[in-house]
Image (spheres, rainbow, N blue to C red):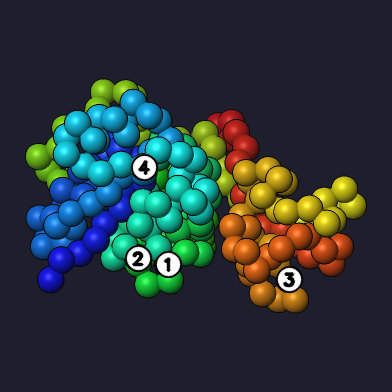
Amino acid sequence: MSSRTVLIGYSVRGRAVVAALRANGHANGFTVADSDPVRAEQAVLEGVPAVVGPCWRLRTLWLAGAHTADHVVVAVPDDETAVRITSAVRSLNETATIITVVRSSEVRELVEHAGADHVVDIRQVYEWAPGAVPPQDGGGESPDLEWTLTERAVTQDEVGRSPLVCGHQVLAVMRHGQRIWVEDSKVGVLRDDDRLLVVSSRSVTT
């Protein structure tokens, strides 16, 4: 049985995860979504269909087929963006297995909260796919960052506006005890009694 996979971020690490899925009988074919036209072009040159655009936008994810995919691999360089993309994917597809690659172990709980089924530290990627060579970019954990997920009230100047214009840190709207992802059309515009679910990070000195 074929399995449809979307890889968000055409990185070495992302391709390693897809290779691991293939080795286990999944991901017979996959599509790439990437915000970088150069990486998307590289995917096309290597015979992989690709979509270019902001990967946290529902339109980009929809064009890539994330709404009907069996597996979605999120492998972008920035952990905060990874959280946002994971939440957007989950809002589109309730049944897909989402695998999110992160740089910092501190963000694991946030990514799971956003909807990831599996959170993979970048070091684990190469345990999954031993044949892949880790890039020499100094990438690893980021122990100097502490991640938090908090709620805040909607400000007066935000009332009547879309949550999408409130900053990329806003993941969801809490309304009458229900969490609505910001990309969900049901959220409409913000109300004065809404609360916003916000992800943030700060530097930690040791």
Q: Quadrant of the C terminus?
A: top right
Q: Position of residue 71 (x, y in %)?
A: 29, 61
**Gap in Å between the C-alphas at discs 1 and 2?**
7 Å
Report helix, strand or loop for mark 3. Answer: strand
Question: On screen, 88 above or below 194?
Answer: above
**Gap in Å between the C-alphas at discs 3 and 2?**
27 Å
Q: Splitting the image into 4 quarters, where does residue 149 fall?
A: bottom right
Report helix, strand or loop for mark 2. Answer: loop
Residue 68: assigned label: 2
Question: On screen, 1 above or below 73?
Answer: below
Question: On screen, 103 above or below 128?
Answer: above
Give yes or no for contact between labels 1 and 2 (Cβ–Cβ under 8 Å).
yes
Mark nearest the camera among 1 and 3 is 1
Mark nearest the camera among 1 and 2 is 2
User: Can residue 129 be seen here?
Assistant: yes
**Gap in Å between the C-alphas at discs 1 and 3?**
21 Å
Q: Earlier in the sequence, mark 4 or mark 3?
A: 4
The residue where tag 4 is placed is 51
The residue where tag 3 is placed is 175
Q: Earlier in the sequence, mark 1 or mark 2?
A: 2
The residue where tag 1 is placed is 93
Badge 4 density bin: few <14, some 14–19, many ≥20, Cα 10 Å: many
Report helix, strand or loop for mark 4. Answer: strand
**Gap in Å between the C-alphas at discs 4 and 1?**
18 Å
Badge 2 density bin: few <14, some 14–19, many ≥20, Cα 10 Å: some
Mark nearest the camera among 4 and 3 is 4
